């Protein structure tokens, strides 16, 4: 399998979309690069009494459609190019679902699994002290990502409010409900993905109650398993995997029992009546729907010819390589790309910002209805672009997102 630089892949996607849209050179040059990049060195006192130095980033990719929006990752292998790529894709994601936000992403190079709770809190607060002048409800609104969570956002929001001497809950999203978070956030990413699967099944005349498999059984994977059966009116989950292993049952799993087992034991392994299979085998099972919800580059030129799913719904970031995209398209496999499939999360984050700004909160049914409307409309707009331009779905989604951002740049007089 080839090795890919995520940001170079993202830039090539921009060039491909720009060519189809006949964008001028200045607009392309503007969209190919982040508008702002911040690189910080953080110093944190550890529980041992020693001070440890951490490298941190915040990339604000584009502000043309509104304040930048994107998560913060805590990961030992984080790189500036990964952050650039993710910030870039967030820009198109917010545009595809047509919410008035730009794109951003942040990261700290650290191993959170080896850190105590107080050390993580100190690191979170130190990061906010570094980025505070450059974020806010009208500038850039962070959220959780890999190895960060609502508690991380609570610490960060508290530190930000301490610095600015104002109550600004909307400066961070995906917070605990008790301090300005919103109903409907926990399952938002999975819900948006399942809604797009529902629409794809209608368009392609595929049985929505058939077999499905999920690679990655974290929060998004678990929620997708439950929501698939709820929203699509059925479906048989025959295989799931996590970092420890993959399991299979031809007759299908009891999804609620499987989720409880995962939460209780920390793994899908040792679930009753489950056969252990290789990780790679799960991706190649004969199913109607496959949800890659774990690793980047999981579907590559190495295994794309063996994929049997009719629909691939990308709940993970970048699970399909560029070569695999072409192979799947040629084989007639319908990919719902990550910038569309996982956009339910940022949609609810936007709704959280709006509620925080007005100090008025909606019930969960209104949140779910709004997500359904936004993702349904976005899916059909992308499907139209695929037909209009005769391209695969990822490029179709890029065409929609890039066109909207390019138009905003032109209206502002930037190009």
Image (cartoon, rainbow, N blue to C red):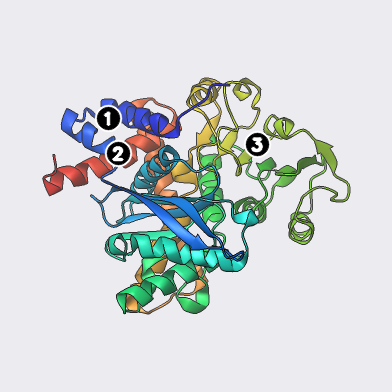
Which residue is found at the position 42% from the left and 60% from the top? 127
Instruction: Rate crowding at label 3 as few (under 14), some (14 to 19) or many (20 or more) other CA atoms within 10 Å.
Output: many
In terms of secondary structure, where does tag 1 sit? helix
Q: Which residue is mark 3?
A: 288
Q: From the viewer's perspective, is the residue at label 2 or at label 3 nearer?
A: 2
How far from the left and from the top, in percent, is residue 32?
28, 34
* Sequence order check, earlier mark of 2 and 3: 3
Say left or right for 406 vs 140. Answer: left
- Identify the residue under disc 2: 402
Q: CA distance from mark 1 to mark 3?
A: 33 Å
Residue 297 locus on image (x, y percent): 56, 32
Element type at marker 3? loop
**Residue furthest left in the image:** 413
Where does the C terminus fall, quadrant-wise? Answer: top left
Measure the alpha-carbon separation of dots 2 and 1.
7 Å
**What mark, if any, has residue 18 been given in the picture?**
1
**Splitting the image into 4 quarters, where does residue 7 fall?**
top left
């Amino acid at each position: 399998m080839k090795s890919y630089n995520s940001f170079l892949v993202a830039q090539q996607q921009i060039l491909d979309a720009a060519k189809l849209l006949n964008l001028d050179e200045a607009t392309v040059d503007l969209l190919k690069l982040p508008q702002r990049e911040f690189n910080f060195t953080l110093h944190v006192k550890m529980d041992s009494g020693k001070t440890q130095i951490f490298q941190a980033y915040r990339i604000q990719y584009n502000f043309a459609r509104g304040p930048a929006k994107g998560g913060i990752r805590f990961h030992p292998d984080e790189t500036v190019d990964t952050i650039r790529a993710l910030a870039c894709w967030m820009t198109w994601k917010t545009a595809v679902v047509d919410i008035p936000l730009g794109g951003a992403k942040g990261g700290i190079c650290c191993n959170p699994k080896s850190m105590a709770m107080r050390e993580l809190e100190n690191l979170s607060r130190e990061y906010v002290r570094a980025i505070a002048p450059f974020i806010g409800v009208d500038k850039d609104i962070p959220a959780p990502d890999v190895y960060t969570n609502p508690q991380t956002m609570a610490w960060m929001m508290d530190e930000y409010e301490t610095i600015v001497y104002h109550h600004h809950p909307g400066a961070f999203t995906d917070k605990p409900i008790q301090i300005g978070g919103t109903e409907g956030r926990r399952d938002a990413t999975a819900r948006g993905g399942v809604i797009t699967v529902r629409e794809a099944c209608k368009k392609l005349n595929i049985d929505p109650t058939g077999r499905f498999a999920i690679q990655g059984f974290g929060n998004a994977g678990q929620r997708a398993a439950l929501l698939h059966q709820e929203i699509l009116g059925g479906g048989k989950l025959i295989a799931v995997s996590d970092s420890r292993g993959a399991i299979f049952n031809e007759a299908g799993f009891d999804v609620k029992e499987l989720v409880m087992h995962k939460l209780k034991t920390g793994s899908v392994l040792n679930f009753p009546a489950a056969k252990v299979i290789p990780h790679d085998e799960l991706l190649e099972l004969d199913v109607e729907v496959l949800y890659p919800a774990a690793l980047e580059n999981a579907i590559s030129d190495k295994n794309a010819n063996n994929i049997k799913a009719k629909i691939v719904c990308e709940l993970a970031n970048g699970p399909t390589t560029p070569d695999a995209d072409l192979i799947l398209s040629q084989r007639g496999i319908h990919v719902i790309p990550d910038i569309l499939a996982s956009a339910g999360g940022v949609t609810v984050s936007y709704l959280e910002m709006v509620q925080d700004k007005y100090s008025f909160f909606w019930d969960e049914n209104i949140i779910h209805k709004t997500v359904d409307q936004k993702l349904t409309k976005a899916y059909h707009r992308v499907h139209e672009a695929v037909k209009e331009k005769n391209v695969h779905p990822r490029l179709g989604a890029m065409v929609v997102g890039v066109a909207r951002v390019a138009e905003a740049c032109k209206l502002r007089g930037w190009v």
